[in-house]
Amino acid sequence: MVFSLRMEPLVTCLIKKHVAKMNKFIVLAALVACAIAAPQRMVLPRLPSSVILNGKYQLIPEDKIVGGTEVVPNSLPFQISLQRRSFGGFSQSCGGSILNENTILDAAHCVDGVNDVTIFRVVAGEHDLSRVSGLEQNRDVSSYLMHPDYDTSTSSNDIALIYLTTPLDLSVPSAKAVNLPPPATEFDPPAGTVTTVSGWGTTSYGGSISNVLLSVDILIVSDADCNAAYAGPFDPNPIFPSMLCAGGLTDGIDSCQGDSGGPLFTGTGADAIQHGIVSWGRPPCAVAEYPGVYTQVSYFLDWIAANRR
Protein backbone atom coordinates (compact mmCIF):
# COMPACT_ATOMS: atom_id res chain seq x y z
CA MET A 1 0.00 0.00 0.00
CA VAL A 2 1.19 3.56 -0.59
CA PHE A 3 2.20 6.04 2.05
CA SER A 4 2.20 9.43 0.37
CA LEU A 5 -1.28 10.40 -0.48
CA ARG A 6 -2.33 11.28 2.99
CA MET A 7 0.90 12.68 4.32
CA GLU A 8 0.49 16.35 5.11
CA PRO A 9 3.01 17.78 4.47
CA LEU A 10 4.78 15.47 2.00
CA VAL A 11 8.12 14.24 3.34
CA THR A 12 11.14 13.90 1.06
CA CYS A 13 13.32 11.30 2.76
CA LEU A 14 15.13 8.96 0.41
CA ILE A 15 14.00 5.37 0.70
CA LYS A 16 14.62 3.13 -2.30
CA LYS A 17 13.77 -0.52 -2.79
CA HIS A 18 14.52 -2.26 -6.06
CA VAL A 19 13.85 -5.78 -7.23
CA ALA A 20 15.01 -6.37 -10.80
CA LYS A 21 13.98 -9.42 -12.78
CA MET A 22 16.96 -11.71 -13.49
CA ASN A 23 19.01 -9.59 -11.10
CA LYS A 24 17.53 -10.14 -7.68
CA PHE A 25 18.69 -7.51 -5.26
CA ILE A 26 17.36 -4.78 -3.05
CA VAL A 27 18.97 -1.39 -2.70
CA LEU A 28 18.00 0.40 0.47
CA ALA A 29 19.14 3.90 1.26
CA ALA A 30 17.50 6.03 3.91
CA LEU A 31 18.04 9.70 4.63
CA VAL A 32 16.80 10.03 8.18
CA ALA A 33 16.95 13.79 8.71
CA CYS A 34 13.58 14.99 7.47
CA ALA A 35 12.05 18.31 8.46
CA ILE A 36 8.31 18.20 8.96
CA ALA A 37 6.70 21.59 9.38
CA ALA A 38 3.19 20.38 10.27
CA PRO A 39 1.67 17.26 11.84
CA GLN A 40 1.29 14.25 9.57
CA ARG A 41 -1.98 12.51 9.11
CA MET A 42 -1.82 8.99 10.44
CA VAL A 43 -3.83 7.39 7.65
CA LEU A 44 -1.86 6.72 4.51
CA PRO A 45 -2.18 5.12 1.05
CA ARG A 46 -0.32 1.91 0.33
CA LEU A 47 2.50 2.50 -2.25
CA PRO A 48 6.12 1.34 -2.17
CA SER A 49 8.91 3.66 -1.04
CA SER A 50 10.59 3.61 -4.44
CA VAL A 51 7.88 5.82 -5.94
CA ILE A 52 9.08 9.15 -7.28
CA LEU A 53 6.76 12.14 -7.58
CA ASN A 54 7.69 15.39 -9.33
CA GLY A 55 11.33 14.35 -9.55
CA LYS A 56 11.73 13.73 -5.80
CA TYR A 57 11.78 10.55 -3.78
CA GLN A 58 8.84 10.57 -1.40
CA LEU A 59 8.56 8.86 1.95
CA ILE A 60 6.03 6.23 0.96
CA PRO A 61 5.76 3.23 3.28
CA GLU A 62 5.63 0.01 1.32
CA ASP A 63 2.54 -2.18 1.50
CA LYS A 64 2.52 -5.92 1.17
CA ILE A 65 0.30 -8.81 2.13
CA VAL A 66 0.75 -9.45 5.86
CA GLY A 67 0.01 -12.96 7.10
CA GLY A 68 -0.52 -14.27 3.57
CA THR A 69 0.67 -17.30 1.65
CA GLU A 70 2.10 -17.77 -1.82
CA VAL A 71 -0.57 -18.40 -4.44
CA VAL A 72 -0.36 -21.18 -6.99
CA PRO A 73 1.51 -19.57 -9.91
CA ASN A 74 -0.88 -17.85 -12.35
CA SER A 75 -3.97 -18.95 -10.39
CA LEU A 76 -5.03 -15.28 -10.25
CA PRO A 77 -4.75 -14.51 -13.98
CA PHE A 78 -6.39 -11.08 -13.62
CA GLN A 79 -3.65 -9.77 -11.28
CA ILE A 80 -0.97 -7.54 -12.79
CA SER A 81 2.19 -5.93 -11.49
CA LEU A 82 2.52 -2.19 -12.14
CA GLN A 83 6.24 -1.45 -12.21
CA ARG A 84 8.35 1.72 -12.42
CA ARG A 85 11.63 2.20 -14.26
CA SER A 86 14.49 2.27 -11.78
CA PHE A 87 18.26 1.77 -11.93
CA GLY A 88 18.19 0.44 -15.47
CA GLY A 89 15.41 -2.04 -14.68
CA PHE A 90 11.96 -2.00 -13.16
CA SER A 91 10.76 -2.19 -9.57
CA GLN A 92 7.43 -3.23 -8.10
CA SER A 93 5.15 -0.25 -7.48
CA CYS A 94 1.49 -1.33 -7.31
CA GLY A 95 -0.88 -4.12 -8.12
CA GLY A 96 -3.81 -3.87 -10.50
CA SER A 97 -6.25 -6.02 -12.43
CA ILE A 98 -7.07 -6.65 -16.07
CA LEU A 99 -10.35 -5.12 -17.29
CA ASN A 100 -9.78 -6.11 -20.91
CA GLU A 101 -6.86 -6.46 -23.31
CA ASN A 102 -6.32 -2.69 -23.39
CA THR A 103 -7.27 -1.43 -19.92
CA ILE A 104 -6.04 -1.99 -16.36
CA LEU A 105 -8.08 -1.17 -13.23
CA ASP A 106 -5.97 0.51 -10.55
CA ALA A 107 -5.87 3.04 -7.72
CA ALA A 108 -5.57 6.72 -8.56
CA HIS A 109 -2.80 7.23 -6.04
CA CYS A 110 -0.63 4.75 -7.97
CA VAL A 111 -0.41 7.14 -10.92
CA ASP A 112 -1.16 10.53 -9.37
CA GLY A 113 1.46 13.15 -10.21
CA VAL A 114 3.14 11.13 -12.96
CA ASN A 115 3.59 13.16 -16.14
CA ASP A 116 5.88 10.76 -18.01
CA VAL A 117 4.04 7.45 -18.41
CA THR A 118 7.12 5.83 -19.99
CA ILE A 119 8.36 5.18 -16.44
CA PHE A 120 5.61 2.55 -16.13
CA ARG A 121 5.20 -0.93 -17.42
CA VAL A 122 2.41 -3.43 -16.79
CA VAL A 123 3.29 -7.10 -16.40
CA ALA A 124 0.53 -9.69 -16.77
CA GLY A 125 1.20 -13.37 -16.10
CA GLU A 126 3.67 -12.40 -13.36
CA HIS A 127 4.30 -14.55 -10.30
CA ASP A 128 7.93 -14.35 -9.14
CA LEU A 129 9.52 -10.92 -9.57
CA SER A 130 13.01 -12.42 -9.34
CA ARG A 131 12.57 -14.91 -12.19
CA VAL A 132 11.39 -15.03 -15.78
CA SER A 133 8.92 -17.88 -16.36
CA GLY A 134 8.16 -17.12 -19.99
CA LEU A 135 4.48 -16.46 -19.22
CA GLU A 136 4.93 -12.76 -18.53
CA GLN A 137 3.45 -10.19 -20.89
CA ASN A 138 5.21 -6.82 -20.58
CA ARG A 139 3.28 -3.82 -21.85
CA ASP A 140 4.10 -0.13 -21.98
CA VAL A 141 1.55 2.43 -20.81
CA SER A 142 0.11 4.93 -23.29
CA SER A 143 -1.88 7.01 -20.79
CA TYR A 144 -4.00 6.84 -17.67
CA LEU A 145 -7.25 8.35 -16.43
CA MET A 146 -7.87 9.16 -12.78
CA HIS A 147 -11.40 9.69 -11.51
CA PRO A 148 -12.12 13.43 -11.80
CA ASP A 149 -13.27 13.60 -8.17
CA TYR A 150 -10.24 11.86 -6.69
CA ASP A 151 -9.32 13.65 -3.45
CA THR A 152 -5.83 13.13 -2.03
CA SER A 153 -6.82 14.51 1.38
CA THR A 154 -9.53 11.90 1.98
CA SER A 155 -8.55 9.20 -0.58
CA SER A 156 -12.13 9.25 -1.85
CA ASN A 157 -12.70 8.16 -5.46
CA ASP A 158 -9.29 6.46 -5.45
CA ILE A 159 -9.66 4.75 -8.81
CA ALA A 160 -7.90 4.99 -12.17
CA LEU A 161 -7.76 3.27 -15.55
CA ILE A 162 -4.41 2.57 -17.19
CA TYR A 163 -4.31 2.22 -20.97
CA LEU A 164 -1.77 -0.02 -22.71
CA THR A 165 0.15 0.71 -25.91
CA THR A 166 -0.44 -2.81 -27.24
CA PRO A 167 -3.18 -5.29 -26.26
CA LEU A 168 -2.65 -8.18 -23.87
CA ASP A 169 -3.17 -11.71 -25.14
CA LEU A 170 -6.08 -12.94 -23.02
CA SER A 171 -6.39 -16.26 -24.83
CA VAL A 172 -3.73 -17.80 -22.56
CA PRO A 173 -4.51 -19.23 -19.08
CA SER A 174 -2.05 -16.88 -17.34
CA ALA A 175 -3.86 -13.65 -18.33
CA LYS A 176 -7.62 -13.13 -18.05
CA ALA A 177 -9.98 -10.21 -17.48
CA VAL A 178 -11.43 -9.89 -13.99
CA ASN A 179 -15.18 -10.14 -13.38
CA LEU A 180 -16.89 -7.05 -11.98
CA PRO A 181 -19.91 -7.17 -9.64
CA PRO A 182 -23.44 -6.74 -11.03
CA PRO A 183 -24.76 -3.14 -11.06
CA ALA A 184 -26.87 -3.43 -7.90
CA THR A 185 -25.95 -2.66 -4.30
CA GLU A 186 -27.49 -5.89 -3.02
CA PHE A 187 -24.58 -7.73 -4.61
CA ASP A 188 -22.01 -5.88 -2.49
CA PRO A 189 -20.51 -8.32 0.01
CA PRO A 190 -22.10 -7.87 3.47
CA ALA A 191 -20.14 -7.66 6.70
CA GLY A 192 -18.58 -10.99 7.58
CA THR A 193 -18.10 -12.09 3.96
CA VAL A 194 -14.78 -13.82 3.33
CA THR A 195 -12.80 -11.99 0.66
CA THR A 196 -9.26 -12.33 -0.65
CA VAL A 197 -6.63 -9.65 -1.27
CA SER A 198 -3.45 -10.31 -3.23
CA GLY A 199 -0.20 -8.56 -4.07
CA TRP A 200 3.58 -8.36 -3.91
CA GLY A 201 3.61 -5.76 -1.13
CA THR A 202 5.61 -5.91 2.07
CA THR A 203 4.86 -8.66 4.58
CA SER A 204 5.43 -6.24 7.44
CA TYR A 205 5.28 -2.48 7.87
CA GLY A 206 8.44 -0.95 6.38
CA GLY A 207 9.72 -4.37 5.32
CA SER A 208 10.85 -5.60 1.92
CA ILE A 209 8.51 -6.54 -0.89
CA SER A 210 7.65 -10.15 -1.64
CA ASN A 211 9.20 -11.68 -4.74
CA VAL A 212 6.22 -14.01 -5.16
CA LEU A 213 2.53 -13.17 -5.36
CA LEU A 214 0.81 -13.61 -2.00
CA SER A 215 -2.82 -13.63 -0.92
CA VAL A 216 -4.73 -13.64 2.34
CA ASP A 217 -8.39 -14.08 3.28
CA ILE A 218 -10.00 -11.24 5.23
CA LEU A 219 -13.56 -10.46 6.35
CA ILE A 220 -15.66 -7.52 5.16
CA VAL A 221 -16.25 -4.96 7.94
CA SER A 222 -19.46 -2.92 8.11
CA ASP A 223 -19.34 0.79 7.28
CA ALA A 224 -20.52 1.59 10.80
CA ASP A 225 -17.71 -0.38 12.45
CA CYS A 226 -15.16 1.02 10.02
CA ASN A 227 -16.30 4.59 10.64
CA ALA A 228 -16.06 3.99 14.37
CA ALA A 229 -12.49 2.72 14.00
CA TYR A 230 -11.37 5.81 12.10
CA ALA A 231 -13.36 8.40 14.07
CA GLY A 232 -10.56 9.40 16.44
CA PRO A 233 -10.86 12.92 17.92
CA PHE A 234 -7.42 14.05 16.67
CA ASP A 235 -7.44 12.61 13.17
CA PRO A 236 -10.93 11.64 11.99
CA ASN A 237 -11.01 9.89 8.63
CA PRO A 238 -14.52 9.47 7.23
CA ILE A 239 -15.49 6.33 5.37
CA PHE A 240 -17.37 7.38 2.23
CA PRO A 241 -20.00 5.31 0.38
CA SER A 242 -17.38 4.76 -2.33
CA MET A 243 -15.19 2.86 0.15
CA LEU A 244 -15.22 -0.72 1.40
CA CYS A 245 -13.51 -1.96 4.58
CA ALA A 246 -12.02 -5.37 5.25
CA GLY A 247 -9.70 -7.03 7.75
CA GLY A 248 -8.46 -5.47 10.96
CA LEU A 249 -10.46 -7.78 13.21
CA THR A 250 -7.31 -9.59 14.33
CA ASP A 251 -3.61 -8.72 14.33
CA GLY A 252 -1.31 -10.04 11.64
CA ILE A 253 -3.55 -10.16 8.56
CA ASP A 254 -3.84 -7.25 6.12
CA SER A 255 -2.72 -5.73 2.85
CA CYS A 256 0.31 -3.48 3.20
CA GLN A 257 2.80 -1.26 1.32
CA GLY A 258 3.17 -2.16 -2.36
CA ASP A 259 -0.26 -3.82 -2.56
CA SER A 260 -1.94 -0.56 -3.60
CA GLY A 261 -4.19 -0.82 -6.62
CA GLY A 262 -4.52 -4.57 -6.28
CA PRO A 263 -7.80 -6.50 -6.13
CA LEU A 264 -10.03 -7.45 -3.21
CA PHE A 265 -12.23 -10.24 -4.50
CA THR A 266 -14.52 -13.17 -3.78
CA GLY A 267 -14.30 -16.51 -5.55
CA THR A 268 -11.27 -18.10 -7.15
CA GLY A 269 -9.41 -18.12 -10.43
CA ALA A 270 -11.31 -17.05 -13.53
CA ASP A 271 -14.58 -17.01 -11.52
CA ALA A 272 -13.36 -14.37 -9.07
CA ILE A 273 -15.36 -11.13 -8.73
CA GLN A 274 -13.48 -7.96 -7.80
CA HIS A 275 -15.22 -5.87 -5.14
CA GLY A 276 -12.42 -3.58 -3.99
CA ILE A 277 -9.15 -1.87 -4.90
CA VAL A 278 -6.42 -1.61 -2.24
CA SER A 279 -6.41 2.04 -1.19
CA TRP A 280 -5.34 3.08 2.32
CA GLY A 281 -5.05 2.19 5.98
CA ARG A 282 -3.50 3.18 9.28
CA PRO A 283 0.18 2.27 9.70
CA PRO A 284 1.60 -0.06 10.71
CA CYS A 285 -0.22 -2.69 8.69
CA ALA A 286 -2.26 -5.51 10.21
CA VAL A 287 -3.13 -3.77 13.47
CA ALA A 288 -6.31 -5.02 15.14
CA GLU A 289 -9.28 -2.61 15.24
CA TYR A 290 -8.18 -0.73 12.09
CA PRO A 291 -9.56 -2.31 8.91
CA GLY A 292 -7.91 -1.81 5.55
CA VAL A 293 -9.87 0.56 3.32
CA TYR A 294 -10.60 -0.25 -0.32
CA THR A 295 -12.20 1.59 -3.22
CA GLN A 296 -15.62 -0.02 -3.75
CA VAL A 297 -15.75 -1.15 -7.37
CA SER A 298 -19.55 -1.36 -7.62
CA TYR A 299 -19.79 2.37 -6.89
CA PHE A 300 -17.86 3.16 -10.08
CA LEU A 301 -19.32 0.69 -12.59
CA ASP A 302 -20.79 3.42 -14.81
CA TRP A 303 -17.53 5.37 -14.84
CA ILE A 304 -15.55 2.22 -15.66
CA ALA A 305 -17.92 1.25 -18.47
CA ALA A 306 -17.80 4.75 -19.97
CA ASN A 307 -14.00 4.96 -19.98
CA ARG A 308 -12.62 1.48 -20.61
CA ARG A 309 -11.10 1.00 -24.07
Image: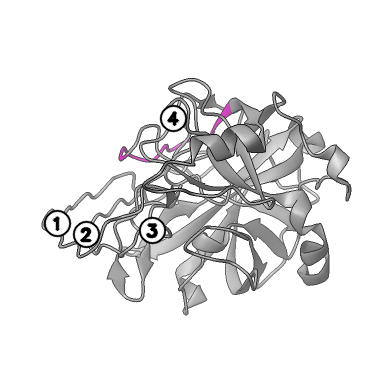
- Say few, some or many: other residues with alpha carbon within 10 Å of mark 3 (under 14 / 14 to 19 / 20 or more): many
Range shown magenta: 206-216
Hey, which quadrant is residue 107 in on the image? bottom right
Q: Secondary structure at mark 4?
A: loop
User: In this rendering, which labeled residue sits more in front, label 2 or label 4?
Assistant: 4
Cβ–Cβ below 8 Å for labels 2 and 3?
no
User: In this rendering, which labeled residue sits more in front, label 3 or label 1?
Assistant: 3
The residue wearing badge 2 is 14
Cβ–Cβ below 8 Å for labels 4 and 3?
no
Q: Disc 4 and disc 3: Cα gap in Å? A: 18 Å
The residue wearing badge 4 is 286
Which amino acid, mark 1? Leu
The C terminus, quarter of image? bottom right
Magenta stretch, main secondary structure, is loop
Which amino acid, mark 3? Ser
The residue wearing badge 3 is 4
